[in-house]
Every structure is written in structure tokens, then in C-alpha cells.
Image (cartoon, rainbow, N blue to C red):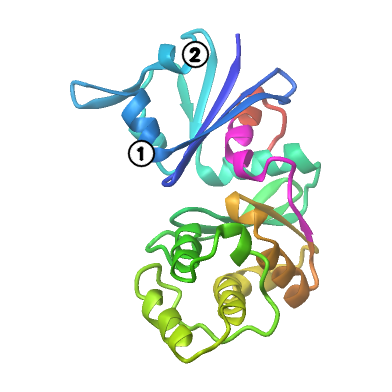
Amino acid sequence: MKNIGIDLGSRYIKLVICNDQGDVLDKRIYSSVDFYRNYGIRNQNILQLDIKKLGISENDNIMSTGYGKHNICFENIIKLSEQKAHVYGAILQTGETDFILIDIGGQDTKVISVVNSKIVDIYMNDKCGASSGRYLENMAQILQMTMDEISQYYENPVEINNTCAIFGESEVLGKVFEGIPVERIAAGINYSVFNRIQPMITRHSQRKVIFVGGTACNNAIRSIIALETGKQIIVPKEPQFNGAIGSVAYKLSLQIV
């Protein structure tokens, strides 16, 4: 029997297979569109997983979390909130029990305060794509940069006020047309993401920040958070798979939150 965690995000689906100690034996990532197209089966207006095609047995322990966890209907699936899944995953991967968790996802941003392994406060921006991974992707595309390239710049930033994933394009293009170096614009974009979440970070006294999700790989945003808050930034071994790992940890009762 395998322990399988699936984080059904808005942009990507992350799947992990773990042993009974929570160690990751296998991991997979799919674009959300490809995943539902290739592995989703609509049966009487209910979306179900083609588990055989995924290489999953009906006898396996299957846990789901994320934006689309309610889109999958399967008898043995356990559904867990994104907040709990990420906290479980962060504790399992780092061993920390007092921290601020940041997850900048494809369409939303979460800041969670954890004390003695317990969730004590949650801030979540899920009303638009502002300061999300999608916003960063859009801005990188406008600057004709890769995500790796845009994640290197944080020094001497130009001020960017509009963090809307759609309307931010006009402001960024305006900076380009003013002749401002793209490196400064990229730095301003990264700072604009931080500025949206700064109040939620600085209101808490924990000295450690655990940064998860794909944006945790953004060196600039990590550096900005450390520089502006003085807090220690911890990125788990598998930041993008943290939610999937946490859902398995919940099932196995590896951590109590």
C-alpha cells in the first residue's frame, strides 16, 4: 500500500508517493490543464480520477489538498485544507514548530502564523491574482525574462504600485517606455510582491519564516524578506511539493497541528 498526496493547485498539480515515515519515494508535477485532460473522467457530472492511468491502486492511501481538492470525487480520498496541509508539510520537512509560513501560489497568497505546531492566524488573498505566482509569470513575460532571470533582481528597484496580474502590465510597460533598465523594473516587481505581504509578516514575532510553493525558488523575494524583516528564511527540501507532503503527514499522523 502506498501513501499518495495530491496537491491540486490552480496552475500545477503536485503528486508525491511516500513511505510510512513520510519520506518521498516519487514525485510528479503536471500542468493543471494537462492533468485534468489526461487523468480526469467525468461520470454523471462528477469528476473522478483515472487512478489506473496514474498508477494508483484503490487500496492506496490517497490524500488531496489544494485549490481543486473538491473537484475530485473518489471513495477513499481524504480531503485536507491547504492551510493545514502546508503547515503539516513544513513541520515534517523542517522540524520547526514556531514559524511564519508563506505560500505564494499560482492564484493566491497565504501567510500563516504557527506557534507550538498550532495555527494561530491565517491571512489569505484569494480574490485576485495580485502578488501571486501568476502575476510574476505575467510580468516576466512582459520583460521577456525567464522566471529564473526575474528572480535574481532586487537591488535598486523602481516603484511598482499595481500588483494586478492583468492591469500591472500597463505600469510595467510604462516603465520600459521611460527607458528604465529592465533589471530595476524586475527588482520593483519582486518588491511589489513583498510589499503586499509585509504587514502580515511583521505583525508576528516569530523569527523564522518557512517559504513554500514554487515562488520559494525566487532568490530575490527570499532576499527581500530577509533584508526587510530581519527574519531567518527557511526553504524546505521540496517547497513546491510541500502541500502534497503535508497531506500525507496528516494521514499518517506524523505531526499534530
Q: Give percent across and percent down for residue 159.
A: 55, 86
In magenta stretch: residue 243: yes
Q: Give percent across and percent down for residue 69.
A: 42, 35
Q: Give percent across and percent down for residue 218.
A: 65, 59
Q: Residue furthest left?
A: 44
Dot 2 or dot 1, earlier in sequence: 1
Which quadrant holds residue 242? top right
Which secondary structure dominates the residues rendered in magenta? helix
Q: Is residue 203 visible?
A: no
Q: Is residue 185 visible?
A: yes
Residue in view at x 76 percent, y 68 percent = 205
Three-letter code for the amino acid on which mark 1 is drawn: Val
Query: Which residues lie in the magenta part?
Result: 233-247
Answer left or right for 5 relative to 208. left
Few, some or many C-alpha atoms within 10 Å of disc 1 (few <14, some 14-19, many ≥20)?
few
The disc label shown at residue 33, or none = 1
Residue in view at x 73 percent, y 77 percent = 228
Q: Which residue is mark 2?
A: 55
Answer left or right for 90 relative to 149. right
Q: In 3D space, how far apart are the residues under numbered discs 2 and 1 (Cα atoms)?
A: 19 Å
Q: Residue furthest bottom?
A: 178
Few, some or many C-alpha atoms within 10 Å of disc 2 (few <14, some 14-19, many ≥20)?
few
Q: Is residue 234 above or below residue 2?
A: below
Residue in view at x 80 percent, y 72 percent = 230
Which SS class for mark 2? loop
Three-letter code for the amino acid on which mark 2 is drawn: Gly
Q: Is residue 231 above or below residue 44?
A: below
